[in-house]
Structures are given as C-alpha cells and as structure tokens.
Amino acid sequence: MTNLSIPAPYRDTLTVKPDWLDENGHMNVANYSRAFDLGGEVFFRDCGIGWDYTREGYGTIFMTNCHLDFRRELLQDDPILVTTRLIDWSPKLVHTYQALYHQDAGYFAASAEMLFIHVAFVDRKSVEMSKQTLARLAEIASVHNTLPRPDNLGTQIEIRR
C-alpha cells in the first residue's frame, strides 16, 4: 500500500444502541470503551493485528493502559464517528489516540489514549510483531505524524487549585 491509501485518521461509524445506555439516559462509560474497541478495528486490521489475526492463534494485542476523556453526552440512536490514529509504536507496543464525535452535530464527545502490547499465545509473554506489521506501522506513522497533536493527548488526571 502507498501512503495515499492510509486514512488520516482511520474512521468508522457506529450508532448508540439502547442497551448501551445507563440510568442517566446516556451512553454508559463501559460502552464508550466498546465503541472505541469496535471503531478501532479498521486500524488494527490494516496493521495486521486485528481480530482476524487473533483468531489465527499466534498472538494478539492486550491493552496495558487507557486514559478516557469525556466531553459531551451521547444518547440513544446518536450516530457516532470513531477516529483512530497512531501516535507511536515500537516492535512490541502500539500507542493510539481515538476520538468519538456525534456524526451529525459534529461535536467532540470523548477520547481514548491507549497503549497496547503484542503477546504470543504460546506463553502469554510479549513478543515483537511481524515484520509486515512493523513495516505497516512505519508507513502509517509517516502519515499520522503529520497530523496536528490532539489537545488532550497525554493529559493527567488532576484537580486544579
């Protein structure tokens, strides 16, 4: 693939399902994680480490760290745009940033900054990703590194006084 075929960022669309709501009538925090997981598959599949790769039985990726940032509510039947971009990578690690937007109204609803580690199923230990995956990550990084840095990337939880 050429750089012209690399989405910047990757995009997928979802709809807030009725069973994703909590007693507040908005999307429950657990389902934001679900939306990020579902919406990020297009990126991971393109890298060669999506769910199809996991089903092959050699290895998978585990999330080691996640920072969620909530900005606005999402309600039942809201159309969601999920964007995924590569922030950094190494032979065993993938650092991503994802954002959820209300697709029609266009507002930024939430983000997730995540770190994943590649693990072999044989011993459940970290192992380098394939040369093909590493080459694809390098191609994606060459495009995604030109994108503006998200304002809330790397933020810490704190109470400002």
Image (cartoon, rainbow, N blue to C red):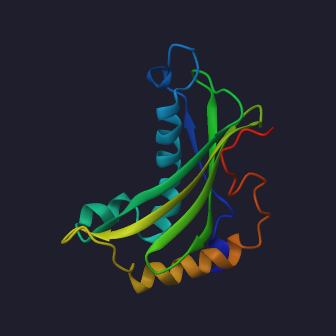
Question: Residue 121 sits in which quadrant?
Answer: bottom left
The foreground one among 128 and 161 is 161
Horizontally, is 81 left or right of 122 in the view?
Answer: right
In which quadrant is the N terminus drawn? bottom right
The foreground one among 153 and 103 is 153
Question: Residue 78 sits in which quadrant?
Answer: top right
In which quadrant is the C terminus drawn? top right
Horizontally, is 133 left or right of 52 in the view?
Answer: right
Horizontally, is 108 left or right of 94 in the view?
Answer: right
Residue 1 in sight here = no
Residue 18 in sight here = yes
Horizontally, is 100 left or right of 27 in the view?
Answer: right
Residue lying at the far left of the rendered structure: 122
x and y percentages locating residue 79 in the rendered image: 63, 32
152 above or below 35?
below
x and y percentages locating residue 54 in the rendered image: 30, 62
